């Protein structure tokens, strides 16, 4: 095995050994075998490209192209041309899969199910890292820097896996890297000759076997690896290293749970609303008969950066035996104690515990921590809701409109924290908020008018296909387009409330589910919801519902204050009519039949005034046309290049060579009169005035000879440039089993080559092009149909085009280096400094 092949094999092995650290992330290890197979194909393509040899950039490009084709074959075959060539649909499918994988990573606990998105991220990531390692270590022959992509692969895996068994995966990855380094060292030493070393003596005094420097390197590597593993264990004060499995914080990571990280739980909300099958997330049994306020709240988002809302980074504590009274809730507000038993599905893994708000007591097994400000429970040391059954005692708070309207000013510290808006918030947001609430007498009336604007009078439409959006102008775009789902409505209302000085945040969880015949309530994926919570002193954090066709409108938003100019809002009610309605339903707590017919939560009708633009834009059509031409032309490039090269070589060759030697004028063939031709014609005993004609004749003869050998190559007879023309001709006759006529043609062309190479005054010969055609016809008649088709469609000699590109690239680099050296060379006679 050659040194480069050994290096390529070690690079592949090192990548796979580092990829083993990804195994704990998913529950199905079969992806690694698929990644190994694709990685070996990728490495084999690189080895073949280097053997041709191709220029290094071309080698990398070929490997990258093959990698894309392999990923298309595995993950987007039905979206690609002929199942292999990726087009716009395949690339869009890749983007969708990557988005799905990102959402799945956020949704599931470790080990996660091997979804298509996660599989693409794993296999594609390993192939990208493998390509980087192969390029650095083998193509550019520098194994040491190849450890960086390997380290990146291991670090990502170790970080996501929470350090589970990290030392073992680190050891495996490190051994693979050492193998790569040793292979490079052996390859470099072999370039100097036989690997040698001193001959140590055995205990008996006899010389033993040689100790190669590679063996010494292995010993050094083992010692270094052992030191890297042992030293961190011996230094307990060095926390957070690669081998430290106990981090800090709560959530998916391990540790004591000192803080809760600002993780955004909205990643999969839209996907949950758009699922084809409304899978049951939780089964709920509650003591209340009124489900309109039975929202299961997961977490509150109170950190607004102008782009999105997310949970603040807050301290968490042990779950108290009895929860404190919710902040701001006064004794005169009517409340009812509700007991709820919740059973989460085995597949539903959520870091936060869904509960009715506000909770006053929770009975749950596992490692959970309590965040006092949001009154939420978050899993610690990887704890999640998968298959959990728990009981929650909560308060059903029923304030009156009068209590909300007469609420006093909230504490200054709370107002400062929960009315912050960034400077990047578009001016249209506070301006629109002031326009909507113009004339309102108090914050409560302002809040109700905001809710009414979004849910009833503002002309907004509920549409789950709208992207969540990003950037500081996301809310402004929503206010302009008036289309979105619960995330848009809750974000916009909470942002506007803050600009009006009303403390606000966004809650994420589930709207009331569907009652079942056995008395339970089924909460499905399509019940996922987000809603704003506004703070009123004496009542506390209060739910509002600005999203049309979702959830229930709170009863306390029906004003009871005399002389109030706040209009009544429609009460939410569940429908028993199984037929679809053109009007948006105001409740998500509807019947099972409505759920089956997908009436509840459906998007509003599209604007009837919208018209189609008559088809795709011109640039899209042009792109498809160009792509179609490329699909047709690219496979035919070798054949077209070969036909052109044959035409150029044989054009007018029947007469031009003789005419040139006879003193006539002729232009050289397309291959030009290069140094090779001038060297071949340098011995000719002709007048200087005839030198050009002699060079042209030599160029034609050599071009015809090259066409003859390439024709034989296309039909399976490989060229051997080490042979003389006469011996090469004899070899073609022998291997091609040619008859006398074809053999004579081959020997005649070989004789013409010997004339221009060795004769002082070569004789002009005509008909050489016909001799090549005679050989081609003879070879065609003696091979199979498959060989004939291959000789035309995929001729072997077309590889010369690649060699030509490589030669031109090398020549260009040489010219560039020469010019650069000329620029920096000091002129003679000048002193430095």
Image (tube, helix red, strand yellow):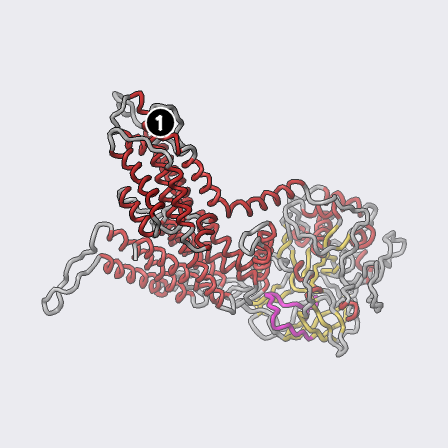
Identify whether 331 is placed above or below 303: below
Residue 4: percent from the left, percent from the top? 32, 53
597 lies left or right of 4: right
Residue 63: percent from the left, percent from the top? 44, 51
**Quadrant where the N terminus is found in the figure:** bottom left
Q: Residue at x 17, y 61 (%)?
A: 210
Circle count: 1
Identify whether 708 is placed above or below 169: above
Look at the magenta stretch and give its main secondary structure: loop
123 lies left or right of 309: left
Residue found at the very far front of the displayed protein? 740
Examine the rendering and report whether any part of residue 673 can be seen. yes
Could you say which is closer to the camera, residue 572 or residue 493?
A: 572
Residue 170: percent from the left, percent from the top? 39, 63
Could you say which is closer to the camera, residue 770 or residue 682?
A: 770
Q: Residue at x 54, y 64 (%)?
A: 252
- Report crowding for label 1: few under 14, some 14 to 19, many 20 or more residues within 10 A (C-alpha): many
**Quadrant where the C terminus is found in the figure:** top left
Could you say which is closer to the camera, residue 140 or residue 582?
A: 140
| Residue linked to disc 1 | 660
Please state the extent of the stretch shown in magenta in the rendering. Answer: 341-360
The answer to which image quadrant residue 803 occupies is top left
Residue 343 magenta: yes
């Amino acid at each position: 095995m050659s040194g480069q092949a050994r290096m390529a094999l070690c690079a592949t092995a090192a990548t796979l050994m580092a990829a083993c650290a990804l195994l704990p992330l998913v529950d199905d290890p079969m992806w690694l075998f698929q990644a190994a197979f694709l990685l070996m194909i990728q490495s084999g393509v690189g080895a073949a490209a280097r053997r041709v040899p191709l220029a290094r950039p071309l080698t990398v490009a070929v490997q990258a192209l093959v990698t894309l084709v392999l990923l298309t074959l595995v993950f987007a075959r039905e979206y690609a041309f002929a199942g292999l060539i990726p087009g716009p649909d395949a690339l869009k499918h890749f983007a969708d899969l990557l988005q799905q994988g990102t959402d799945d990573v956020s949704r599931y606990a470790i080990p996660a199910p091997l979804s298509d998105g996660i599989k693409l991220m794993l296999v594609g990531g390993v192939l990208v890292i493998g390509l980087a390692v192969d390029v650095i270590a083998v193509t550019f022959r520098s194994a040491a820097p190849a450890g960086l992509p390997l380290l990146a692969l291991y670090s990502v895996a170790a970080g996501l896996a929470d350090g589970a068994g990290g030392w073992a995966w680190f050891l495996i990855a490190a051994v693979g890297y050492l193998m790569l380094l040793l292979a490079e060292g052996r390859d470099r030493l072999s370039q100097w000759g036989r690997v040698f070393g001193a001959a140590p003596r055995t205990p008996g005094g006899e010389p033993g076997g040689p100790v190669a420097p590679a063996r010494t390197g292995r010993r050094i590597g083992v010692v270094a690896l052992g030191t890297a593993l042992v030293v961190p264990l011996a230094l307990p004060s060095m926390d957070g290293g690669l081998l430290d499995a106990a981090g800090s914080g709560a959530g998916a990571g391990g540790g004591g749970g000192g803080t809760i990280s600002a993780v955004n739980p909205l990643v999969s909300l839209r996907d949950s609303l758009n699922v084809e099958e409304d899978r049951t997330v939780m089964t709920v049994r509650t003591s209340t008969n009124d489900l309109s306020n039975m929202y299961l709240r997961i977490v509150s988002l109170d950190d607004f950066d102008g782009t999105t809302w997310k949970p603040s980074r807050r301290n968490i504590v042990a779950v108290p035996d009895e929860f404190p009274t919710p902040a701001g809730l006064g004794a005169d507000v009517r409340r009812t104690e509700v007991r709820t038993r919740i059973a989460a599905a085995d597949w539903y893994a959520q870091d936060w515990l869904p509960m009715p708000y506000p909770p006053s007591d929770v009975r749950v097994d596992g490692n959970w921590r309590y965040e006092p400000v949001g009154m939420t429970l978050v899993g610690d040391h990887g704890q999640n809701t998968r298959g959990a059954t728990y009981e929650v005692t909560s308060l059903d708070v029923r304030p009156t409109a009068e209590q909300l309207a007469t609420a006093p000013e909230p504490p200054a510290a709370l107002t400062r924290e929960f009315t912050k808006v960034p400077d990047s918030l578009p001016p249209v947001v506070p301006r629109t908020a002031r326009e909507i609430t113009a004339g309102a007498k108090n914050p409560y009336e302002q809040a109700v008018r905001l809710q009414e604007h979004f849910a009833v009078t503002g002309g907004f439409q509920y549409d789950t296909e709208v992207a969540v959006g990003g950037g500081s102008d996301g809310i402004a775009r929503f206010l302009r387009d008036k289309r979105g789902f619960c995330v848009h409505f809750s974000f916009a209302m909470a942002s506007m409330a803050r600009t009006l000085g009303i403390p606000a945040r966004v809650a994420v969880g589930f709207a009331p589910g569907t009652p079942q015949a056995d008395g339970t309530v089924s909460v499905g994926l399509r019940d996922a919801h987000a809603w704003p919570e506004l703070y009123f002193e004496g009542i506390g954090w209060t739910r509002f519902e600005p999203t049309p066709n979702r959830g229930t409108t709170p009863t306390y938003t029906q004003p009871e204050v005399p002389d109030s100019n706040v209009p009544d809002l429609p009460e939410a009610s569940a429908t028993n009519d199984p037929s679809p309605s053109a009007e948006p339903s105001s409740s998500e707590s509807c019947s099972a039949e409505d759920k089956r017919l997908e009436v509840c939560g459906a998007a509003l009708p599209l604007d009837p005034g919208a018209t189609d633009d008559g088809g795709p834009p011109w640039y899209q059509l042009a792109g498809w046309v160009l792509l179609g031409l490329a699909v047709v032309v690219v496979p035919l490039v070798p054949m077209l290049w070969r036909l052109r090269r044959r035409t150029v070589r044989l054009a007018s060759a029947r007469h031009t060579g003789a005419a040139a030697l006879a003193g006539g004028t002729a232009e050289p063939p397309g291959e030009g009169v290069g140094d090779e031709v001038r060297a071949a014609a340098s011995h000719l005993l002709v007048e200087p005035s005839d030198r050009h004609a002699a060079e042209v004749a030599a160029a034609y003869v050599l071009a015809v000879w090259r066409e003859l050998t390439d024709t034989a190559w296309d039909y399976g007879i490989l060229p051997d440039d080490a042979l003389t023309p006469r011996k090469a001709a004899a070899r073609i006759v022998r291997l091609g089993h040619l008859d006398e006529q074809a053999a004579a043609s081959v020997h005649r062309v070989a004789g013409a080559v010997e004339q221009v190479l060795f004769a002082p005054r070569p004789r002009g010969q005509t008909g050489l092009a016909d001799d090549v055609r005679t050989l081609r016809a003879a070879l065609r008649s003696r091979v199979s149909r498959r060989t004939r088709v291959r000789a035309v469609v995929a001729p072997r000699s077309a590889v010369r085009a690649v060699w030509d590109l490589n030669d031109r690239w090398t020549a260009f680099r040489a010219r560039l280096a020469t010019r650069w050296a000329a620029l920096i060379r000091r002129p003679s006679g000048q002193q430095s400094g």
